[in-house]
Image (cartoon, rainbow, N blue to C red):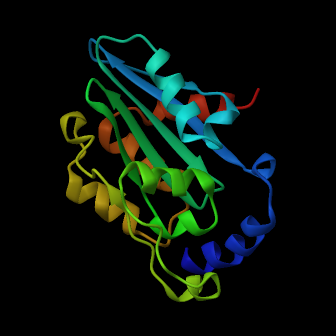
């Protein structure tokens, strides 16, 4: 994927936010039942927009968001009483994508000091709270392995996460409905 990421990141540098592709899906679990629903496309452009939409969902159980941004990287966002917990699958994405830069800022992590021309030679790394889905059946070590797999696109990584937690069918239906 690093080759794919590198070839696409140059395009991403020139693209406006309106050109972003991907999906933003809200996931809830109440009384053992998983539900996935598309978020507004604006959630792919703005961390605060995604967080606001997730906070507006009313659920007695787990609530989190899965964002696939341009098939380049993913974000997992989980609002809670103490604030938002998140994982960014590729810290180097902050060089090209505002939402990734916002995620690193939220985590109080500096944007990597890399020359954009050298991105093809750098393996991506995840940042954030890798254990944010531990209670739902996805240990931090497994999430790290999934995020580190550079042969997979972000949507494939999110599908693996959904399979591990048990909501793959619900996620697939929400992705199919996204943007309609």
Q: Is residue 104 left or right of residue 97?
A: left
Identify whether 150 is placed above or below 78.
Answer: below
The percent coordinates of residue 88 (x first, y second) are: 43, 55
Q: Quadrant of residue 16?
A: bottom right
Which residue is pictured at 45% across the width and 80% down the height?
A: 123
Front position in the image: 174 or 48: 48
The percent coordinates of residue 30 (x first, y second) are: 31, 14
Which residue is pictured at 73% across the width and 50% down the height?
A: 20
Front position in the image: 50 or 109: 109
Q: Is residue 161 left or right of residue 37?
A: left
Identify whether 8 is placed above or below 161.
Answer: below
Instruction: Quarter of the image for the N terminus: give it.
Output: bottom right
Front position in the image: 177 or 90: 90
The percent coordinates of residue 178 (x first, y second) are: 68, 31
Identify whether 132 is placed above or below 82.
Answer: below
Tally the marks.
0
The percent coordinates of residue 89 (x first, y second) are: 43, 59
Q: Quadrant of residue 104?
A: bottom left
Which residue is pictured at 48% across the width and 79% down the height?
A: 113
Instruction: Quarter of the image for the C terminus: give it.
Output: top right
Q: Is residue 40 left or right of residue 118?
A: right
Q: Is residue 151 left or right of residue 23?
A: left
Identify whether 70 is placed above or below 86.
Answer: below
Which residue is pictured at 25% across the width and 45% down the height?
A: 138
């Amino acid at each position: 994927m690093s080759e794919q990421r590198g070839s696409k990141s140059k395009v991403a540098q020139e693209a406006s936010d309106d050109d972003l592709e991907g999906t933003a899906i809200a996931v809830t679990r109440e009384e053992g039942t998983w539900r996935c629903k598309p978020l507004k496309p604006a959630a792919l452009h703005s961390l605060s927009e995604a967080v606001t939409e997730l906070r507006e969902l009313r659920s007695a159980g787990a609530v989190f968001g899965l964002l696939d941004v341009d098939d380049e990287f993913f974000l997992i966002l989980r609002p809670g009483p103490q604030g938002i917990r998140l994982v960014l699958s590729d810290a180097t994405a902050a060089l090209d994508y505002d939402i990734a830069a916002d995620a690193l800022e939220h985590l109080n992590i500096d944007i990597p000091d890399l020359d954009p021309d050298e991105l093809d030679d750098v393996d991506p790394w995840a940042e954030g709270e890798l254990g944010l889905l531990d209670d739902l059946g996805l240990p931090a070590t497994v999430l790290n392995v999934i995020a580190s797999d550079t042969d997979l696109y972000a949507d494939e990584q999110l599908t693996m996460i959904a399979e591990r937690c048990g909501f793959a069918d619900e996620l697939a239906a929400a992705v199919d409905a996204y943007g309609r």
